[in-house]
Image (cartoon, grey):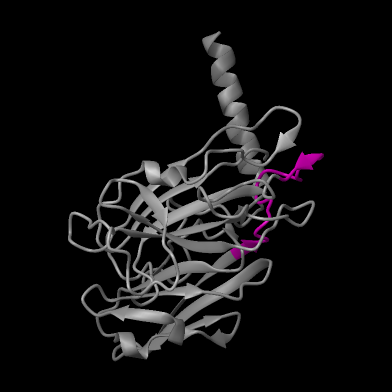
Amino acid sequence: MNYLCNFLRALACTLLVSAIPSGQIYADDDGDSHHGDHAFRIDVLSSRPYMVSGGDALVRVSVKKKDVSLGSVRIELNGANITGAFHADAGARTLTGLVTGLRNGENELSVDAKGKGKGRADADITLTNYPIQGPIISGPHEFPFACTTATFVPFPGSPALGVSSEPDCLVTTRVQYVYRTTGGEFKSLPQPFSPLPGDVAKTSTGVPYIVRLETGTINRAIYQTAVLHNPNDAAPSALASKSLSLAVEFLGSTPVPRTDPVRSPSSVFGSSIKSNLIALPTTCREQSV
């Protein structure tokens, strides 16, 4: 029996590796090996470089060469200058930004600068992008598949998410705000957002306990993210905090008939939110891969 289990595990690993196209297997576990990594380290923070989806990726460039200033670094995507999308951290010697406009398939992200020493230093990495509806490595989508966005209610008392486009279960992403009351309940935050209701609770750090709730679909699955954010303040940003609390829940595939996830609305609130800047409990269940 042990021999059979070991054989099946080895076979599964072999099939998974063979499913990744040639040239997309990287030298280390992080998948961050790339041309020119002695001068710059390019990290894709939102996914593996070869598993980007939806046309955008959060990227961080670390400048390794001490004689290269952050201001001299130029970042390009497929030949177009996108340096302006990156925010510099002088202390960490990094540039972090949201790279958008990725085409489906391979995209080249290149970094270069003119240093004071040996001249130009450059590096590049390939970002492989897939449609937001998938698939990525799981093979063709299975059919028939029933989309349930028309009956899914993101938060009690709010309208259903809406009818999706078949067969990819795509739906318009919805952003709404809810808050925790002084009595310990969650309620929808009424508009206009200012002034705030008198029963808004405070977090342990003293800020209003207001949550930005985003609901949408990725790869024919409904996802929700919850981030502490007061809508009267500036737009939330993943770059605003160096610490990020993340909880991810995955379930297995459903039996026939195939359907997108049927889950209790706003279960993301089951995770505690402790940071005054960003906490990101995330529920994304892939039901058919």
Region rendered in magenta: 128-147
* Residue reaching furthest to the left: 205
Closest to the observer: 183 or 122? Answer: 183
18 vs 57, left or right, is right
- As for residue 165 lying within the magenta part, the answer is no
* Residue reaching furthest to the front: 198
Indicate the quadrant where residue 115 lies. bottom left
* Image quarter hosting the C terminus: top right
Q: In the rendered image of this protein, does residue 129 appear above or below residue 9?
A: below
Residue found at x 54% / y 34%? 251
| Residue 161 percent coordinates (x, y) | 63, 54
Q: From this viewpoint, is residue 142 visible? A: no
| Residue 268 percent coordinates (x, y) | 43, 46
Indicate the quadrant where residue 194 lies. bottom left
Q: In the rendered image of this protein, does residue 47 appear above or below residue 7?
A: below
* Image quarter hosting the N terminus: top right
Q: In the rendered image of this protein, does residue 8 appear above or below residue 108?
A: above
Indicate the quadrant where residue 3 lies. top right
